[in-house]
Image: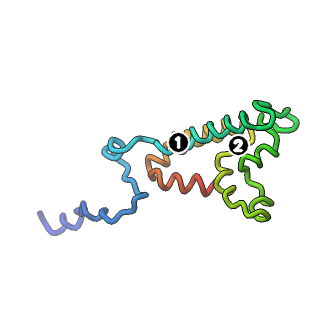
Amino acid sequence: MSSSDSAFQVDDDSHSDSYDCEVPFGEEQRERSWPHFLTHLLMGTNIASFIAMLGLQPHPWSIMPLGQNPFLGPRTSVLVDFGGLSPGEVRGKHQWWRLLSCCFVHAGMVHLLLNMVVLNQLGFVLEAHQGPCKLGVLYVNTG
């Protein structure tokens, strides 16, 4: 082997200091982990929280008329009660947990369906290429 060939060799140990969030994209990584675990978990959590919100509201399983909620969902007060983002609640009452809980509150069935379609398409790709840790950070930060 000439000295010019050795300049292009890759040291296999060079990635040993990588962060836990970094997931190499390749066949062996897909075989080692449960594929798309976080994407499935997020979709399930979103759907379960919407069903719980509809079932636990003061008038269970009621949907507001299209004129009041075009997303086919409950009243605005129910959304706030279940952790929806309300600047007055966050700043005035110091309910900072709403910055996270709002990621799982949807205004109605149309809102939930569109978000799940996008999460289904982008979540799988992002989780496969970037890993579940980075997908989770992105999901929470874009909530």
Where does the image place residue 142, in percent across and percent down from the top left? 63, 55
Would residue 32 appear left or right of 60 to someone viewing this image? left
Measuring 56% from the left and 55% from the top, which residue is drawn there? 138
Q: Which residue is mark 1?
A: 41
CA gap, disc 1 and disc 2: 16 Å
Between 8 and 38, the residue placed more toward the observer is 38
Which quadrant of the figure has residue 15? Answer: bottom left
Q: Quadrant of residue 99?
A: bottom right
Cβ atoms at labels 1 and 2 below 8 Å apart: no
Task: Tell me the amino acid under the disc marked 2.
Answer: His
Q: Measuring 66% from the left and 51% from the top, which residue is drawn there?
A: 101
Q: Amino acid at mark 1?
A: Leu
Decide if residue 6 is on the left or right side of residue 65: left
- Answer with left or right where residue 57 lies relative to residue 52: right
Q: Quadrant of the N terminus?
A: bottom left
Considering every residue shown, the one lying at the far top of the view is: 61
Question: What secondary structure is marked by label 1?
Answer: helix
Q: On the image, numbered disc 2 is attached to which residue?
A: 106
Identified at 13% across, 66% down, the residue is 2
Residue at disc 2, secondary structure: loop
Residue 38, percent from left and from top: 49, 45
Outermost residue to the left? 1
x, y percent for residue 54: 73, 35
